[in-house]
Image: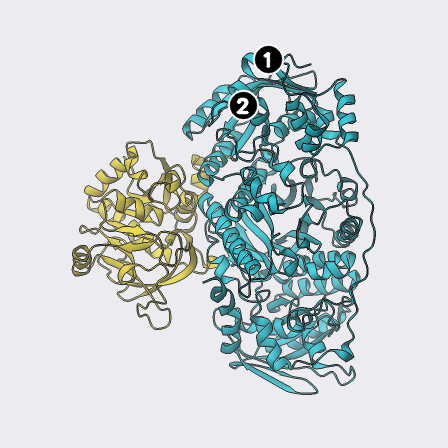
Amino acid sequence: MPTFISPTPITAELIARHGVTPDEYERIQKILGRDPNVTELGVFSVMWSEHCSYKSSRAELRKFPTTGPTVLVKAGEENAGVIDIGDGWGVAFKMESHNHPSAVEPFQGAATGVGGIIRDIFTMGARPVFLLNSLRFGPITGDTVDVKLNRRLFGGVVSGIAHYGNCIGVPTIGGEIYFDESYSGNPLVNVFCAGVLKHEEIARGAAKGPGNPVFYVGAETGRDGLAGAAFASRELTEESKEDRPAVQVGDPFKEKLLLEACLELLALEGAVAGIQDMGAAGLTCSTCETASRGGTGVEIDLALVPQRETGMSAYEILLSESQERMLIIANKGREADVRRIFEKWELPYAEIGRVTDDGMMRVKHGDLGVVVEIPARQLAEEAPLYHPEAKEPPAVPRLDLAKLDFISPQEALPRLLAHPNLASRRWVYRQYDYSVRGGCVVSPGSDAAVFHVREADKFLAATSDCNATFCRIQPRQGAMMAVAEAARNLVCSGARPLAVTDNLNFGNPNKPENFWQLRESVEGLAEACRAFNTPVTGGNVSLYNESPAGVVDPTPTVGMVGLIEKEEHITRQYFRDAGDVILLLGSIGGGLGGSQYLLQLHGKNEGPLPRFDLPSEIAVQESLLSLIRAGLVKSAHDCSEGGLAATLAECCITGAAPIGASVALGTRNLDRRDDDLLFSESPSRIVLTVAAENAAAALLLLQRGGVEARKLGTVGGDELVILTDAARYAWKTSDLHAEWSETIPALMS
Amino acid sequence: MSPPDSPTQLELSLPKLAGRRLPRFAVIQFPGSNCDQDCVRALRDDCGYAAEYVWHQESSLAGFDAMVVPGGFSYGDYLRCGAMARHSPVMRAVSEAAASGVPVIGICNGFQILCEAGLLPGALIRNRSLHFVCAPVTLRVESVESLFTSQCYAGQLLTLPVAHGEGCFHADPDTLRTLEENHQVLLRYVDPLTGESTEASNPNGSVSNIAGICNAERNVFGLMPHPDRATHARLGSEDGKMIFAAMAEHVAGVAAKR
């Protein structure tokens, strides 16, 4: 029991202000066998916030498949999962959100998001090798106050990511960006990091060995980011701007030093017993989690913590979310190694306590004595678990195709390519250093990024995907399609998908319709991950993504990593040589529900989603992979936003120099409108090319594999020509390229 | 992780060149350097030379044949790019080595450091776009009379990536005139198709499209593009090897004369 008697009385109002419910307060009293003091209340409030405890989503997350032959560290065990990539090497990866901080302060919010996810990876003992990001903003076209704000958020987030990633020297090699009304004022910033390590180098976040010294290393603690975890667990309101002190300030230079120092220390055999980063809930979370995982207790003295401000209270030091800090439990007798390495890297460090065997998180504050004494395991593991009510919202209206105006594809394709959702992202990725570490083999802008990990001599492919419009219309199927698209993107680059990290972005879970979307999405993700044999190795849940204007579309972002067996299997999305034959793998598809054509050109938010089933999707992906491994494929591009027409256009214009193509779509038996034919976002389709002399063999192989495939046409010329039963459409590739490439720079200049 | 410069791994990564000592490159490590590992791997694995890290607190560079000041954000670059790094003990040693004719190459942030240290004229300021820029660029070799471009032909076009926020080369008119008259401009940003220096091909607003310059003695070279990221075909270009090969060739020549 604390020896220090806090002068602050615990009132019902104070409890409520900490976001602690009366039931939760009773639970706290039961665990402690007494009333908490205000510092302890603060500790419980952050540890039991949605952000740290997943109290509303935990029961759902248990539905994910988390095991498999390649899983070395499972979801939830540590800061990030680790997957075997062969030859004794593993890849650690994870995705995390920084939505709320980015809404309030886009530059620092996004920057510290990158810093946080990088720390999660090197905490595992892995060398961070690349970053991805998945971003969503409100519309950026126009001149309204909201649109201007969205542009400011977009520009600020991109600069923040660039600032942090470029400085620390971890390349940002891919990702996705979408613009939709639902994200107006409530952007989503999901960042992903992957790192590599040898199996025996996996570090654990456990406080093992009573008597072992506990070190604080990294930046000094300040008042910045006070209780950010609690901040991220509320809806955004007009007053959120006043929460600005809850947004932390990042220092990538310091993190670079911390990264190198930690990896240098971890490389010394037997020096480190446990290591944990201080992210959300800072010192509080790292001490009680390491103790809980180690089955031990931890005792620290806050007076020993390096501080950048004077007069900080125990409450402030414990709950601060200052960046670039780690907790290291050294093995007794190896203190000198910690000191030597952190002195070399000129980083603050201090021995602040030791591991105990009584299971308590005990915090002293100098002469004040013991200020916090809480059973660590119960604090970390026994957060309340909620099963919020779920209610299906009214169905999204169904499109009546007969009543939909026909926009000629001749006009529609350039307009779609010029829409910010499809337009070139070069303005963005030019600001990211993607070439540092000399491993980015397929640069940003292709279906998946491909990275050569020099240390391990392995080729990894990675992507992040989610069509949130689909998820709004039918969350279960939308989530399944997100997994399928991610896997398809990897396969298009020549990789076999290995595992998934997910970032669930939803609204307030206490609103039954939001929770229904969450549950449906999780079940859809789980089913698809099982089908693809891609276990979920970790991730993040971000709830309360609501602004005064409403809730975001359900956005279960899927980050997926795959392994490319041989360098020669690396495949790019753009057409290569005149004369190559273009094939469509998968059915011709159909259905405009949820398509960009319907949404952006007709302004209609209507469903239903096009038909999707997992077995056909898997068959398509397997046959492409065997075709690639047979050495037959010259390019492969996943068919997604903008449908077949946009896919073909992208194949023509995303290479070093635009190249044309002639395509004939014989649909005599289908009786289809050309807009439905060309802009349906029907899944499970891939546009690929083969050398003319291999076309017959490729088609035969595909048909033998039992998948639908057909010849579409030939690469060549300076026009994209599409012939349907009804009409002939033709566009100069240079014109399409101009439409596609000029949109975002023009909006952002 | 075994330290990257342990002798066993070093030996493994080096092809055996019969009877000839491998040129030994020092790759300077400042706190915040982030291309040091890229440089060492490019030199060892892709070029087959010996390369070792030298920590910024070292004051001796004895035993090294050539120096690389790599890219990154030395000391966080919070003051002015490269302004802090020039005061480190190792930079005194680099300056001494440069004065004795040893080849010194500064890449990106390394170029900024060499300018700050007075080993090269001019300065690098914020890109004209105000944005960080990462992209492959085309460069024209303006002079082959240097320890760095001797393996190229005059007018040759090279492809190297740039990745910087402050790479706009700036110098006063007198300095510029001197640089041009002495053919100290070794690389210029040009259009990949025409080979002409145009505004569109200039990624950062550098005066006269200058991408890299050498000192009057022609043994110190600073450039914003990254030869260290263009030493393998899979990265889109191997042109960076030519620059390191020229340095190695010079070193071998010096050794032969001894």
Q: Position of residue A173 (x, y in %)?
A: 53, 54
Dots 1 and 2 on the same chain: yes
Dot 2 falls on a residue whose secondary structure is: strand
Residue closest to the eye, A229 or A17: A17
- Which residue is found at the position 63% from the left and 37% from the top? A229
* Amino acid tagged 1: Gly
- Chain that appears yellow: B
Chain under label 2?
A
Q: Is residue A359 visible?
A: yes
Residues at marks 1 and 2 touching, judged by CB atoms closer than 8 Å: no
**What numbered label is drawn on residue A215?**
2
Residue closest to the eye, A675 or B102: A675
Alpha-carbon neighbours of circle 2 within 10 Å: few (<14), some, or many (≥20)? many
Image vertical order of residue A31 relative to residue B225, above or below: above
Q: Position of residue A230 (x, y in %)?
A: 65, 36
Q: State left or right for residue B81 relative to residue A39.
A: left
Q: Which residue is mark 1?
A: A369
- Which residue is found at the position 71% from the left and 80% from the top? A405
Dot 1 falls on a residue whose secondary structure is: loop
Q: Position of residue A126 (x, y in %)?
A: 56, 39
Alpha-carbon neighbours of circle 1 within 10 Å: few (<14), some, or many (≥20)? some
Residue closest to the eye, A200 or B28: B28
* Amino acid tagged 2: Phe
Image vertical order of residue A310 relative to residue A522, above or below: above
The Cα atoms of the two marked residues, 1 and 2, are separated by: 20 Å
- Chain that appears cyan: A
